[in-house]
Amino acid sequence: MDDKTAQFLQKIRTFSEEVNLYFSSDLIAKAIDELVDEYNLDNDFVMDLIYDFFISDFDIEKLKTSITGKINNVEKFISDFLGKLFLPVASFIEFKVKEHIKKPDDYKKYVDNFNDLIESRNVDELLDFVDDLENKIDFKEEEELVVDFLGKSIMEVLKSQDYTGPQKVNGSALYLLINKPDCLNRFIKTFLSNQEKIGSKKMMLNDREEEPTIANWIKHFIKENGNEMFGSIALAKYLTSTFVNTLLTEEEKKILRKVLKLYRNLNFFPESMANIPREDWEIFPVERDVVLGSKNINRIENKPKEEIIKPKIEEKIEIVKEIEKTQELDLPDLKNKELKELQDLFTKYPDKSLERKAIENEIKKINNKK
């Protein structure tokens, strides 16, 4: 394997799953075909441009140098090259693609197609997971787990540093609410009756002194804000009110905040999850530390619920079992160690992917030398 191919394969593995998914898809193959046809170029030439662009860390000047004298309208080709091949994954690479494209909106369909690809991939994986889960799940056991948590174990989980508690409850609760929606009323009723205490000072409720139970805190919140869906502003205003500040410490207010978010998520489900991607749904509020771009759901730490309701995307490498469906290659000397290794590697990448094409070119080069 020559240095360029090896460098490219090593380089692309360092990018996110989204980038690898895109460059292993039919979308990239179609975009390359468009460039080949429109500019009357050799397919291998375009592939080399892509390899070099990755290896050079997206050096636009090197790209211009490579095409100068070979393409008449360099500026237009640069826009097409970037718009069709790299704009769809612009949010996942450290390169400001739009700055080098004259009219980014001209390439909207390529971005939309990639977004559809991700959505389709996520839905397929979720459905596969659900099918597998349905064969294993004990509905009654899961329902009792959630009821026990909502009725008497909320504080234990809220105070614990171990996220496996909310992970399990979120997964079970969401699965049941989606697939057995009649559980919702029981969950709400149990939660609104919770007698665990937040704080130690008694509170005034309806002109009576009451224990600061979760049930009473929610009653007071409803009394102040009404029994309608509420947002972050109403929540913040309540938590900074004199009433709350008089009764609770800062740590206790953090707990109350989570309890009220849980109330919103559960009591108004599924409206409470409107405009939120399915993989980000939650009943029990989970704290998240955003590390990188907000659009990349895999770049968020401490998202245990995702492991329950949506499995992580597996490694990009797909094992292609039916080799008969792929392009036949002339491998006259399978005893050659390098050819064997390349052939094994070749079948591990999806048809039409850049990685597969790079390995195919290597095999051809070796055969041409014989």
Image (spheres, rainbow, N blue to C red):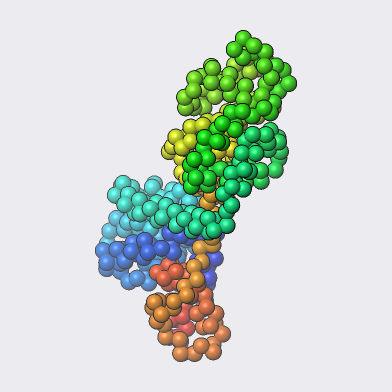
- Nearer to me, 246 or 24: 246
Q: Is residue 39 visible?
A: no
Q: Position of residue 175 (x, y in %)?
A: 53, 47
53 relative to 215, above or below = below
Can the viewer see residue 122? yes
In the image, 290 versus 311, the foreground residue is 311
Residue at 68% across, 36% down: 153
Who is closer to the viewer here, 39 or 37? 37
Taking the spot 49% from the left edge, 90% from the top edge, the residue there is 333
Q: Please tell me which residue is depicted at 42% across the width and 86% down the height of the picture.
A: 330
Q: Is residue 134 left or right of residue 73?
A: right
Q: Nearer the viewer, residue 228 or 24?
A: 228
Task: Give the image location of residue 99, x and y in percent.
Answer: 39, 46
Q: Is residue 109 left or right of residue 86?
A: left
Is 34 above or below relative to 231?
A: below
Residue farthest right in this picture: 200
- Residue 357: give x, y in percent of width and height: 43, 72
Task: Provide residue 169's location: percent of width, then percent of height.
Answer: 61, 43
Q: Residue at x 67, y 34 (%)?
A: 152
- Total residue callouts: 0
